[in-house]
Image (cartoon, rainbow, N blue to C red):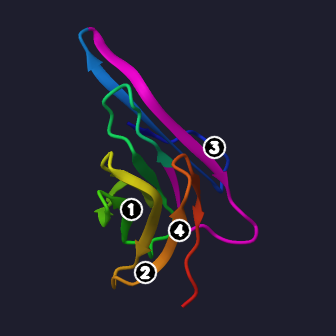
Amino acid sequence: MFKQKSSQENNSNLQMEYARKIIFGWKWAWGGGYSIGESSQFTSAMDYMSIPELSHISTPFPMLFGHILDPAIQRVTVEFEGNEKRVLAEAKLVEVGPESIIWFVSLPSSATIPYEIKGFNDKGELVTHKQMDDPNGMGSMVLEER
């Protein structure tokens, strides 16, 4: 479940919570979220957070997710090492309100750091990218100068 908390204008925040169906209803299992204030030095094109795999319960993790803040970004991918080869995972983009799009991708348990997040425009051109070296990382990405 994705949830956006009420926040001040110009802040980006997103929660991702995972619940499991049990005999008496639903039980929260794991999740997390972030809140990032807007910088006066740059305008964010998208933001991201990574939630690592849990070893003791079955979950959809590791997972990367975030907001797309610039309409120029039309596609998001995540590249990672997995089973001794480079793997490309396509993120799912979901419109959740007027001018509000979230993206997410569940990675296989074989995925290892570093992850490389890439954002592409409608022509398929790379317009932003970020290499993540922390499985619990979060942050913002800006559009690259063309």
Q: Percent position (x, y) of residue 99? A: 45, 61
Q: Which mark is residue 126?
A: 2
Give the mark nearest the N terminus, 1 or 3: 3
Q: Residues within 10 Å of mark 4 (few under 14, many from 20)?
A: some
Q: Earlier in the sequence, mark 4 or mark 3?
A: 3
Q: Which residue was labeled with disc 4?
A: 130
Q: Which residues are magenta?
A: 24-49
Q: Which mark is on residue 80? A: 1
Dividing the picture into quadrants, the one containing residue 124 is bottom left
**In front: mark 4 or mark 3?**
4
Give the alpha-carbon distance from disc 4 to disc 1, as whole Å. Answer: 12 Å
Query: Foreground: 37 or 144?
Result: 144
Question: Element under label 1?
Answer: strand
> How busy is the neighbourhood of tag 3: few (under 14 within 10 Å), some, or many (20 plus)?
few
Query: Which quadrant holds the N terminus?
Result: top left
- In this view, the residue farthest toward the front is 84
- Looking at the rendered image, the disc whose residue lies closer to the viewer, 4 or 2, is 4
SS at mark 4 in the image: strand
What kind of residue is marked 1?
Answer: Phe
Amino acid tagged 3: Ser
Mark before the other along the chain sequence, 2 or 1:
1
Q: Which residue is mark 3?
A: 7
- Taking the view exactly as shown, the residue that stands out farthest to the top is 24
* For residue 142, side relative to residue 103 (left or right): right
- The answer to if 2 sits in the magenta stretch is no
